Image (spheres, rainbow, N blue to C red):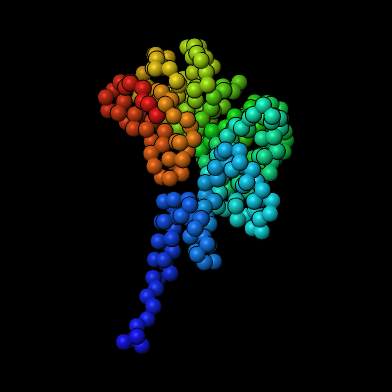
């Protein structure tokens, strides 16, 4: 009987699908599967590197060190890395330039990133950052834009912003009118969780009001705040696209949810807009 038995093997496309699905479900599983064979490694590497999370600091340092010894070309990383999470990381022992140097080492490998969280918070203009960022075309962007693109204030006419659909800001640029001209902006969020007060005449609120009045592409305008009374601002704007969010968790879990294909803050905001449109009035702030 043994002479008639043969080893069963999945067709290559089915085998690849199994490996990829398992890798997407769990990063640690993906790392283990990459060790199974050279073929399996080729299948799952793009999934492993799709989301680069550089928090906490030890993770960031380990990844930077791996880039220094890698045998893979930068084009491999530029093709694979789609989500980049580089948060503000400061301790009393660190200098302001540390995060800039980290970004200068990292960004040549992240030119294809579409979803970018970049809070290196430079306190001076460093043209190396502009040279590295200018060719990137992020779609979802959450960044401290001051001093980031070769000038103290962001220039929203730069090609860097051409593909941005989701934008998060926490500081009002001097030229807020330029934001309304972003050709694909559909989702806008003011992240106010580090502020203690929200006066009605705040420049950030003026940005929101201007977008709601003039943007032809805007679908969601959200204000995220820690105060339960946030829905009292902008009372004159009865616009179903305006959503208020009470922050109950840090921002990173929302990025992690998005990376996993789960509901993130934008999904909750979209649901709130739909509900407000159906009811014809503002709903209570959502908590997320």
Using residue 109 as the reference point, say whether residue 2 is left or right of it: left
| Residue 151 visible in the current orientation | no
In this view, the residue farthest toward the left is 279
| Residue 253 visible in the current orientation | yes
Query: Which x, y percent locates residue 214?
Result: 47, 24
Using residue 208 as the reference point, say whether residue 2 is left or right of it: left
Which quadrant: the N terminus?
bottom left
Q: Is residue 32 above or below residue 123?
A: below
Q: Is residue 256 above or below residue 246?
A: below
Query: Which x, y percent locates residue 169?
Result: 53, 27
Using residue 191 as the reference point, say whether residue 240 is left or right of it: left
Give the number of callouts. Answer: 0
Res 285 quadrant in image: top left
Res 89 quadrant in image: top right
**Could you tell me which residue is drawn at 47 percent across and 30 percent down?**
250
Which quadrant: the C terminus?
top left
Query: Which x, y percent locates residue 133?
Result: 64, 40
Q: Is residue 245 above or below residue 137?
A: above
**Could you tell me which residue is drawn at 45 percent across and 36 percent down?**
253
**Front-most of residues 208 and 97:** 97
Query: Which x, y percent locates residue 283?
Result: 32, 22
**Could you tell me which residue is drawn at 26 percent across and 24 percent down?**
279
Res 10 quadrant in image: bottom left
Using residue 49 as the reference point, say whether residue 229 is left or right of it: left
**Front-most of residues 170 and 228:** 228
**Could you tell me which residue is drawn at 37 percent across and 32 percent down?**
268
**Front-most of residues 206 and 265:** 265
């Amino acid at each position: 009987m043994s002479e008639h038995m043969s080893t069963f093997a999945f067709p290559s496309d089915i085998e690849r699908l199994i490996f990829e699905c398992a890798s997407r479900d769990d990063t640690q599983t993906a790392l283990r599967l990459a060790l199974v064979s050279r073929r399996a490694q080729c299948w799952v590497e793009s999934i492993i590197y799709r989301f680069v999370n550089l928090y906490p600091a030890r993770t960031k340092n380990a990844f930077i060190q791996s880039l220094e010894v890698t045998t893979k070309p930068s084009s491999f990383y530029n093709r694979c890395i789609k989500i980049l999470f580089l948060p503000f990381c400061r301790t009393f022992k660190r200098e302001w330039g540390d995060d800039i140097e980290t970004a200068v080492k990292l960004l040549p490998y992240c030119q294809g990133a579409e979803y970018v969280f970049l809070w290196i918070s430079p306190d001076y203009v460093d043209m190396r950052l502009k040279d590295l960022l200018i060719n990137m075309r992020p779609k979802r962007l959450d960044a401290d834009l001051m001093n980031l693109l070769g000038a103290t204030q962001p220039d929203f006419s730069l090609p860097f912003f051409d593909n941005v659909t989701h934008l998060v800001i926490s500081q009002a640029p001097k030229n807020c009118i330029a934001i309304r001209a972003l050709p694909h902006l559909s989702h806008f969020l003011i992240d106010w969780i580090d502020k203690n007060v929200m006066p009605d005449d705040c420049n950030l609120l003026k940005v929101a009001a201007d977008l709601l009045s003039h943007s032809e592409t805007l679908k969601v305008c959200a204000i995220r705040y820690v105060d339960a009374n946030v829905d009292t601002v902008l009372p004159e704007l009865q616009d179903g696209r305006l959503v208020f969010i009470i922050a109950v968790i840090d921002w990173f879990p929302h990025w992690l949810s998005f990376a996993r294909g789960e509901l993130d803050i934008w999904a909750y905001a979209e649901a709130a807009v739909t509900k407000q449109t159906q009811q014809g009035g503002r709903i209570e702030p959502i908590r997320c």
